[in-house]
Image: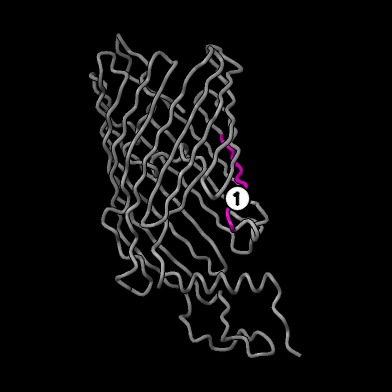
Amino acid sequence: MRKELSNIQLLRLLAGIFLFLSPFFMHAQDIHFTQFQASTVQLNPALTGLYNGTIRFSAIARNQWATVPVNYNSAKFSVEYNVLTMKNRDKLSVGVLFYYDRAGDSRYSTSCPSLSFAYSKALGSKKNQYLSAGVNLALISRQMDYSLLKFDAQYNGEFYDANAYSFESTGKVTKNVMDIGAGLAYSFFFQKKYSLEMGLSIQHLNQPNYSFKSDKKVTLNSRYTGHLSGSIALTQNFAIMPQFLYQRQDSKQEFVASFLFKNKILSHKKTDMAFYYGPSYRVKDAISIVVGVLWNQWNFGFSYDVNSSGFRKASNTYGAVELSVQYIYSHLIKYKDSKQICPIF
């Protein structure tokens, strides 16, 4: 008697076929985060070092589609260092970033260490503006294990035979490519009441070949990013923080709009604490809630996505969970007219 495939087995089989065939008819796409302001170096290399302090540590982790057998897990860690701050407030900064992404039964993964450099020019008589330019160099490594996949040729009409020949590639395959990106950014800060940050970046300028089989048609197309965020203090203890992101990579595009609110609950010489919270919407994909805590030099964030795309039938509307943390270490040179000039979102 012939055994029927369960829903989970069918999903795994389809996912395996999709991952195997995708290099032949698709261009590669990048990972993304709902809390994109917690991943600024990846967003735009020109944002490297654009904060108040000497060193900034950032980490973010994302688990997507946990109810689906082929869920995605992504993580990123970065360190930024303001190497030189001149008397005219110009800054030279360097950043190191590493991100990792894994999905599916084949353990299809992408890892990427990168190095970014940025120069920020202080503008205005009060030096409360910055125009920044940055570049990043990266090594992207992709890997998958065909031996973990199941193919239709291994079903003999009665049952699945793991020892049957699949007529496909076997074992682990790896692909390493060099990558280049660049960006520009502008920031403005006024009397701790208003701040603005905007920028443009282009990733994968060299459009590296991305195929496991050296197919020249499979490239990592350039990704164009535009971002805008700000903070408006309506009272001494309450502010609104709108954030916008637009990305385009070949025919795929993403638009995210977030409207966060910040309530300061404690202000002391040695302790400052505030909560921020609000909705975020990724057009035709997900509705999210973002909450977080600002405590002195720490920033802890959490977000949850509710899937609103056509994939919600498989995901049961469950989207993604994200956790982020940032810490800024300060050892600043104090000038006689020293003022805080970079916004912290």
Q: Position of residue 163 (x, y in %)?
A: 59, 87
Which residue lies under the disc numbered 1?
308
Q: In what quadrant of the picture does the N terminus appear?
A: bottom right
Q: Is residue 53 above or below residue 183?
A: above
Is 78 left, or right, of 125 in this rendering? Answer: right
Residue that sits furthest to the right in the current view: 1
Please say which color scheme the image uses.
one colour
Indicate whether residue 305 is drawn in magenta: yes
- Label 1 residue SS: loop
**Along the line of sight, which residue is nearer the eye, 335 or 146?**
146
Q: Position of residue 213 (x, y in %)?
A: 36, 75
Indicate whether residue 230 is drawn in magenta: no
**Along the line of sight, which residue is nearer the eye, 345 or 198?**
198
Q: Is residue 209 above or below residue 82?
A: below
Q: Position of residue 8 (x, y in %)?
A: 68, 69
Q: Residue at x 52, y 24 (%)?
A: 240
Q: Residue at x 50, y 49 (%)?
A: 75
**Secondary structure mostly seen in the magenta stretch:** strand
Q: Is residue 158 above or below residue 323?
A: below
Start and end of the magenta stretch? 301-310
Q: Residue at x 32, y 73 (%)?
A: 214
Label 1 sits on what residue type? Ser
**Along the line of sight, which residue is nearer the eye, 281 or 71?**
281
Is 184 left, or right, of 173 in this rendering? Answer: left
**Along the line of sight, which residue is nearer the eye, 269 or 302?**
302
Q: Is residue 194 above or below residue 4?
A: above
Is 79 left, or right, of 206 in this rendering? Answer: right
Q: Residue at x 35, y 32 (%)?
A: 49
Categorize mark 1 by other alpha carbons within 10 Å: few (<14), some (14-19), many (20+): many
Is 269 left, or right, of 212 in this rendering? Answer: right
Q: Position of residue 17 (x, y in %)?
A: 53, 74
